[in-house]
Image (cartoon, helix red, strand yellow):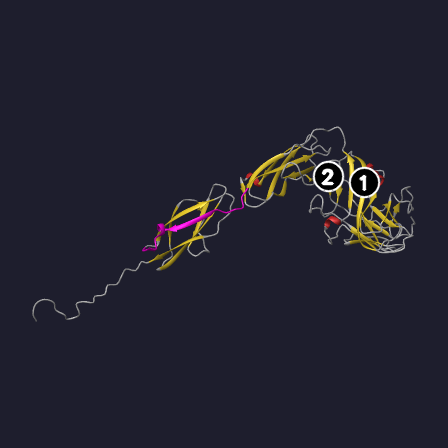
Amino acid sequence: MGVAAALLVGICLLSSSVWADQMIFQRQVSPSSNYTNMYDAKVSPTDSSTAPGNPYSLYLNSPVGAKNVCYFDVSSLPAGSTVTKVTVEYDFYSGKPINASVGVFQVTTNWVGGAAWKNKGGDWVDLNGTPQGPLPFSSVVANYNGWYIWDVTLMVQRWVKGTAPNYGILIIAASSATNSGQTYASGYLSLNGMTFRPILRVTYTPPSGDSTPPTGTVTINSGATYTNTSTVTLTLSATDNSGTVSLMKFSNDGTSYSSPEPYNTTKTWTLTSGDGTKTVYAKFADPSGNWSSPATDTIILDTAPPTDSVIINAGAAVTNTRTVTLTLSATDNSGTVSQMKFSNDGASYSSPEPYGSTKTWTLTSGDGTKTVYAKFSDPAGNWSSAVTDTIVLDTTPPTPTITAPTDGQVFGGSS
């Protein structure tokens, strides 16, 4: 590969997730969206220094043109691990075939830390360790849209062993390229989804000598019996003989687990859909890669409110007093109705109180048709829609009218 090539250099600080002996680095995708420590930068052939930026695309141009740099932080690999296979993967999603090989090289200047380039447009060494040399660590011919994979095992092994500093990976198109303009997804790409961002895939053997896994516990919603939403908060606690718990992962069925993520004492988790008893499984790992047996906790997911009814004064049509007796009936799929509340206008309700089958209630003042509203809740906090009943309040007595005798009329006897 010629030295006079356009560079796609990516220096991306990305997050990680671990599958036993494999760790994947991809910004905001794995292990979670909380990982945002990513840097991309564009480098022109005349640049003497570069500040980290956030372009949405990494543009590969040949023989000369735009350059970009990508850096993967691999410090979260378990200490003492043996790296056996590493690939760097980019999604080429736009542009023309360049009809030439594209190779990967090792960056030699800490530009993220603010250092200036010794050579304008970027510094690197090739596979033989030659500064600005032409021999890539590996290469591919990138002629069609899709994912391209380069082997960077030797490069990352040097980083992990400390025999070479990790300043990033440089991707260079050969000077023999016949077309220019290939666009690769960067660590900040939103088009087509974040899963198209660059990936560093590291396969490794954990250090030997510690075979004792951590022990841990998981508690759902602080030990609550019920929840009315599938989103819950897990409280986690784990210890290990090494003094460090490094990773955790979760499952709703004890078989399929989430991607491992750094250990923490809390985690927002989503239960499976459908009401009923739910079990959450949690596993914890130490720096040696020992995974614990699953810790579990259960909670009842109940999203259905009670069904209910209210009857005023045993169904009477009229009352002559504002104080009435409500007859109440409610059932719930959980088997328990826990609370009830009432209103005269359907807007302002009384304070919730324990469920009962009767309730003394006071109607609003003023004769006329009155409506009473009632709502009921279950232990999960699901409130029913209002049920109603009506009654006529009539507190005004009749007014008598005398029609006979008429004024001055005499009955019986003579005048």
Nearest to the observer: residue 87 or residue 207: 87
Q: Which residue is mark 2?
A: 18
Q: Residue 362 appears at what percent x and percent y?
A: 37, 53
Residue toward you, 351 or 30: 30
The part of the image, by quadrant, that contains residue 407 is: bottom left
Rendered image quadrant of residue 126: top right
Residue 107 can be seen in this image: no
Task: Give me the C-alpha separation between circle 1 and circle 2.
Answer: 14 Å
Q: Which residues are magenta?
A: 301-320
Q: Position of residue 253 (x, y in %)?
A: 63, 38
Q: Does the stretch in magenta take in 319?
A: yes
**Callout 1 touching callout 2 (CB < 8 Å):** no
Q: Is residue 266 left or right of residue 14?
A: left
Q: Which residue is mark 1?
A: 86
Task: Classify mark 2: residues with Cα within 10 Å, few (<14), some (14-19) or many (20+).
Answer: many
Q: Amino acid at mark 1?
A: Val
Viewer-proximal residue among 137 and 119:
137
- Across and down, in percent, residue 216 comes to 64, 33
Farthest front residue?
144
Q: As displayed, is residue 210 above or below residue 256? A: above
Along the polypeptide, which appears first: circle 1 or circle 2? 2
Task: For mark 1, give the secondary structure.
Answer: strand
- What amino acid type should be assigned to the residue bearing mark 2? Val
Query: The C terminus lies in which quarter of the figure?
Result: bottom left
Q: Badge 1: how crowded within 10 Å, few (<14), some, or many (20+)?
A: many
* Residue 229 drawn at (x, y percent): 57, 46
Q: Secondary structure at mark 2?
A: strand
